[in-house]
Each structure stands twice: as structure tokens, then as C-alpha cells.
């Protein structure tokens, strides 16, 4: 958890030093994060009429054009909700700057069969295998029901669709 829990609805202060705010630049301009666990920290740089710039990440109002895809919190931290695209906007008064975040679903990066090796008695022995799946968002989950099980030597052993191997003959 990031420590932030609620999307911003209003959090705003005005420019400092009496100078007029002329622009806001949001960085990064584009980003891609994973739905459910991905986050992106945005920064806002405010430009003023006296040709100065100042970091203003905490003093702008942050918003997301598509909260079904991504939410944004008071200090510029975006969180991926579901696959889609959102425009992230930093606003102060009538001046704003934008960035685009693309939220993608996690992709399968690997399957590890456990146990890696096993010995079973021919004719009566069985071994239940599991296949935890690893995903691009650094999570893992049981995917035993979503994999196709196969065995290299079907004369020696068989395997069911749920990963239960049975010894047939020594081999």
C-alpha cells in the first residue's frame, strides 16, 4: 500500500510570491502501469509570469479523466484500477497541465511446476503437482486449473487435467 486511500476531489492553493501562474508541466508525460498493483508518481512544475519555475506537486488539484482505469491522489500518485487510458490533470485556478497514463492487465511471465522432481510407486503411486503462475506485476497465483498438463513418458506415468500424476511402470 501506498498510504493514500481516497482520490482527490479538491485540494488547491494559489501561486506563490504574487506572480501569475502561466503554465503547469506534468511529468512523466506518458506512463504505463499494471492494473491492481501499479502506481506512478507524477510531478508538477509551475511556471510564473516572472519567468520562474517551482515544483508544485503538492499544491495543485490532481484529477483523472477515467477513474475506472486510474485514480490520482492529492500528492500526484496514480494507481491502476483496470485496463484503459486516463488523462491525468494538475490544475491550479484556471491553469492546468496534463499527462497520459495507460493501465494494462498483468501478463503471465512464468509457471513453476512443484515439486520439481518426484518418485512414485509404479501401479499405485500418485503425485499431485501444482503450477503457480507468476505475473508481470510481481504477483503469483495458483493456476493449476488454467494450465494444460502433459508428461514426457506416458508409458511410465500419466497425468490428469488437474495435475495428478500416477505411476504406470518403472521408468
Image (tube, helix red, strand yellow):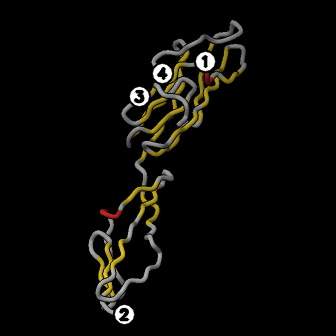
Q: Nearer the viewer, residue 68 or 101?
A: 68
Q: CA distance from mark 3 to mark 1?
A: 19 Å
Circle 3 crowding by C-alpha within 10 Å: few under 14, some 14–19, many from 20: some
Q: Which residue is mark 4?
A: 8
Q: Mark 4, mark 1: which one is toward the viewer?
A: 4
Q: Secondary structure at mark 3?
A: loop
Tell me if label 2 and label 4 are in contact, CB under 8 Å: no
Q: Earlier in the sequence, mark 3 or mark 4?
A: 4
Q: Earlier in the sequence, mark 4 or mark 1?
A: 4
Q: Earlier in the sequence, mark 3 or mark 2?
A: 3
Q: Which residue is mark 2?
A: 170
Q: Which residue is mark 3?
A: 65
Quadrant occupied by the C terminus = bottom left
Q: Nearer the viewer, residue 136 or 148?
A: 148
Q: Residue at x 64, y 25 (%)?
A: 45
Quadrant in which residue 50 is drawn: top right
Q: Earlier in the sequence, mark 2 or mark 4?
A: 4
Circle 2 crowding by C-alpha within 10 Å: few under 14, some 14–19, many from 20: few
Taking the image as shown, residue 93 lies to the left or right of residue 35, namely: right
Residue that lies at the very extreme toward the left in this rendered image: 161
Q: Secondary structure at mark 2?
A: loop
Residue 59: which numbered mark, if any?
1
Image coordinates for residue 113, horizontal then vertical, percent: 43, 70
Amino acid at each position: 500500500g501506498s498510504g493514500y486511500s481516497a482520490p482527490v476531489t479538491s485540494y488547491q492553493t494559489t501561486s506563490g510570491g504574487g506572480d501569475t501562474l502561466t503554465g503547469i508541466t506534468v511529468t512523466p508525460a506518458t506512463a504505463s502501469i499494471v492494473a491492481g498493483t501499479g502506481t506512478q508518481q507524477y510531478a508538477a512544475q509551475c511556471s510564473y509570469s516572472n519567468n520562474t519555475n517551482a515544483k508544485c506537486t503538492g499544491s495543485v488539484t490532481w484529477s483523472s479523466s477515467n477513474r475506472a482505469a486510474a485514480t490520482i491522489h492529492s500528492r500526484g500518485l496514480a494507481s491502476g484500477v483496470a485496463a484503459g487510458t486516463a488523462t491525468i490533470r494538475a490544475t491550479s485556478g484556471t491553469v492546468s497541465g496534463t499527462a497520459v497514463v495507460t493501465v494494462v492487465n498483468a501478463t503471465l511471465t512464468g509457471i513453476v511446476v512443484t515439486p520439481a522432481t518426484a518418485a512414485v510407486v509404479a501401479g499405485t503411486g500418485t503425485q499431485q503437482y501444482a503450477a503457480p503462475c507468476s505475473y508481470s506485476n510481481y504477483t503469483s497465483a495458483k493456476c493449476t486449473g488454467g494450465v494444460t498438463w502433459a508428461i514426457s513418458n506416458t508409458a511410465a506415468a500419466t497425468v490428469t487435467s488437474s495435475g495428478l500424476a500416477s505411476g504406470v511402470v518403472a521408468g
